[in-house]
Image: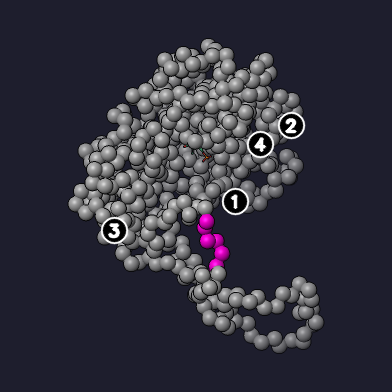
Amino acid sequence: MSDRPGGTRPGTLRVEPSLFEIGAPGRRGYGLPPLDVAQTGLEDLGPMDRGEVAGFPEASEVDVVRHFVRLSRLNYAVDLGLYPLGSCTMKYNPKINEEMARLDGLARIHPMQPPATIQGALRLMHELTGMLSEITGLPHITLQPAAGAHGEMTGIMMARAFLERHGDPRKVVLIPDSAHGTNPASAHICGYVVEEIPSNARGCIDTERLRRRMGPDVAALMLTNPNTLGIFESEIETICGIVHQKGGLVYCDGANMNALVGVARPGDMGVDILHLNLHKTFSTPHGGGGPGSGPVGVAAPLAPYLPVPAVVARDGGFDLDWDRPQSVGKVSSFLGNFGMHVRAYAYIRALGARGLRQVAERAVLNANYIRARLADTYHVAKDQPSMHEVIFDDSRQAPHGVRTLDIAKRLIDYGFHPPTIYFPLVVQGALMVEPTETESIQELDSFVEAMREIDREARETPDLVRTAPHHTPVGRLDEATAARRPRLRYRPES
Ligand SMILES: *Cc1c(COP(=O)(O)O)cnc(C)c1O
């Protein structure tokens, strides 16, 4: 079926044996001529010589190259095609970012070098904080946190330090029911009790409920804007007013900044603390567990609590400032994931203000295009204009016995990475599609066609969808067992 580049044609992918099952005794990846000089005696490694390793694979160069190339073809990647994993902003990462991060002067410095010898790196970090500050409307930025969730924790630590300093750290953090799971986890880890604020029919925060609940025991509201339903919280200024009036702080999860970058600034809306995901909005690599980067911006009253050391301009150069007595301390080893700072810096410099604005405009356009083209086939969860992502559900396919998981698995046969599924939890059977701005109309159209085709299959041949994927080396895994009891070691007899 799929002749898409990167698609899986039936039979082209198979289970790859392990290296232990490849090759044959005596096979070598190299050939050296026999020794034609006298032995020195140094060849005897003594106790360091472990001699033969029983069962060690012996393979030729071509065996090994083909093994790894075949393995790489079992992967799906942003460099192969659309990767519409909602909430994750899997945009294409320009290769120039990688080239910059690999420049010797940036890649080969040591994190413990004295500031005088890494002036360029410090300048880059200082300028990056300035640019992120301009983008978010928040005057102070730390680059230390290594992920979005880490930024949330750092942000809530600062909120606690600030409130403590003003007499009472308070007890509760309010979080909308559509939030990403890391939000309650971060608040909890910082010692707060989490309370849920329900969304209204539009999928936004119910401001009346918020007004009634907001009181002197509430430390902060943690909200995501645009929220995880892909909808802009248009009452954001009212919301900030309600929280501030009772002495609380507004934490904004800025993981969805791709919808706003260059267009609107959370700081201008009244937000006090915000984290960014450089590995989402600012096009640093994302996946495989990192490394990521989750800078945090704060309003002026929170500046004394930022992590140390701060990168500062001083005496015509740049330095690390450790002298911040109210700081929450260090939250990361060294200065954070510097390689990500370089990539984000290169990305922002390459695009400029106009380019960044186009990122948001096109990301929003692409999501709305997909919504418009699929709305007659898949039920749209909330009938609101989309920002950067759109959420469908399986309510039209379910009567045929085809559920969200089946649709996602079938998309793999069509050569697409599935969207995020069953999140946010407030939408039953959610299919969360975030195309990002880097996709062409042809790529979006192929995705739409695949989704329409799957809907047709759901009605005509539902078993085909229920048992997908069919073109991968393995079909449906038992997801619980695969996660809890993975087989990580090769055993010849099993
Ligand atoms: C991705 C994401 C996070 C967490 O970011 P990580 O870098 O994965 O820790 C938090 N909130 C939202 C809305 C997200 O999309």
SS for tag 2?
Answer: loop
Write down the quadrant of residue 303 in the picture.
Answer: top right
Task: Decide which of tag 3 and tag 1 comes sooner along the chain.
Answer: 3
For marks 3 and 1, give the one nearer the viewer: 3
Residue 132 appears anywhere in the view: no
Q: Which residue is mark 2?
A: 322
Q: Within 10 Å of the Cα at label 2, are there few (<14), some (14-19), or many (20+) other Cα atoms?
A: some
Distance from disc 1 to disc 4, alpha carbons, whole Å, reads 27 Å
Report x, y in % for residue 348.
50, 38
Q: Within 10 Å of the Cα at label 4, are there few (<14), some (14-19), or many (20+) other Cα atoms?
A: some
Residue 217 appears anywhere in the view: yes
Distance from disc 1 to disc 2, alpha carbons, whole Å, reads 28 Å
Report x, y in % for residue 440.
32, 45
Residue nearest the observer in this picture, 287 or 420? 420
State the residue at coordinates (51%, 74%). 21
Query: What amino acid is found at the position of numbered circle 4 in the picture?
Result: Val
SS for tag 1?
Answer: loop
Query: What amino acid is found at the position of numbered circle 3 in the picture?
Result: Ser
- Please tell me whether residue 98 is drawn above or below residue 23 in the rendered image: above
Q: Which residue is mark 1?
A: 103
State the residue at coordinates (39%, 48%). 83
Distance from disc 3 to disc 2, alpha carbons, whole Å, reads 57 Å
Quarter of the image with the N terminus is: bottom left
Q: Which residue is mark 3?
A: 2
Q: Which residue is mark 4?
A: 331
Q: Which residues are magenta?
A: 485-490
